[in-house]
Amino acid sequence: MKRVALILAGGAGTRLRPLSSDENPKQFLRIFDGRSLLQKTVARARRLTGAIYISTNEQYAGKCRHDAGEMVNILTEPERRNTAPALALSCREIEAREGDATIAVFPSDHFIADEDEFARVIDRALTFAASSDVLVTIGIPPTEPNPGYGYLQLGAPMAPGVFAVERFIEKPSRERAEAFLRAGTYAWNAGMFVWRASVFRRELQRVAPPIAAVTRETYASMPSISIDYALMEKASNVAAVQGDFGWSDVGSFEALERAGVNVAALLNR
């Protein structure tokens, strides 16, 4: 089955200001090996998939083209409406062009330390999703009781390294995060997803019909809602592949420091 990567690159990077700006959000910052986070995301996707698509807004289309090159397909969002409308519109376009492909969805602004392990985990997720009518997410084994992340409660194993997802928990209190860490049956929600185009379409039609029916003409009327709230928390067929590959959403200056970036030097340039 054909494998496709869909990279979400429309975010404004507000949590890293003034290092980032609305004109140059964090996915375009060249702070890792002289390459932007988007460039690194595209390079990882090339190892795993054939076609690569980037979903972004008109403001960043040129920057995405500059960073990603001519062989990548750029899909533009008419308005900023968060990830659910963006994924609905993009996956519809991908299905029209590529058929019932297996789609791996990656944020453009995450840091991955162990790219070989990342490739192994995503390959497992792509293989599982290709042969199963499930929506797959990537769960990161928590290393601390971080209340700034969403969590997945993991259930019964479905395959080696793959678990049913019992529920999503949005940014718990520190006390609950500590309990999750002790329990050992919870994972951080990395915001990466893998699914067949037809499985995504059918499940979105079931739980969120107006979003599933989105077109470019109706996009501005869509609610601004994440795919977690609109779909994943309501779906009954969700699985998680666990992956320990040095993941960070680079959502704070402290996270940048942990990834080996000299933030003070960057801010003083």
Image: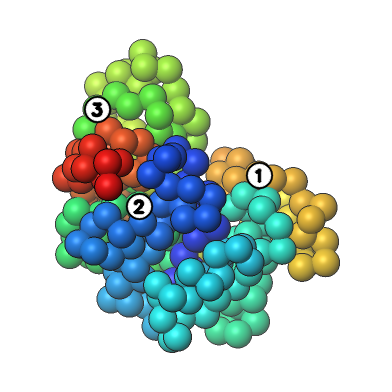
Whether residue 215 appears in this view of the structure is: yes
Question: Regarding mark 1 in the picture, which secondary structure is present there?
Answer: loop
Q: In front here: 208 or 105?
A: 105
User: Nearer the viewer's eye, disc 1 or disc 2?
Assistant: 2
Q: Amino acid at mark 1?
A: Ile
The percent position of residue 74, horizontal first and vertical second, equals 55, 75
Distance in Å between CA atoms under marks 2 and 3: 18 Å
Q: On the image, numbered disc 1 is attached to which residue?
A: 225
Say few, some or many: other residues with alpha carbon within 10 Å of mark 2 (under 14 / 14 to 19 / 20 or more).
Answer: some
Q: On the image, numbered disc 3 is attached to which residue?
A: 144
Instruction: Name which residue lies at 40% across and 60% down.
Output: 28
The percent position of residue 33, horizontal first and vertical second, equals 20, 62
Distance in Å between CA atoms under marks 1 and 2: 20 Å
Q: In front here: 204 or 108?
A: 108
Question: Regarding mark 2 in the picture, which secondary structure is present there?
Answer: loop
Left or right of residue 224, residue 32 in this image = left
Whether residue 53 appears in this view of the structure is: no
Q: In front here: 238 or 175?
A: 175
Left or right of residue 96, residue 35 in this image = left
Question: Regarding mark 3 in the picture, which secondary structure is present there?
Answer: loop
In the figure, residue 106 lies in which quadrant? bottom left
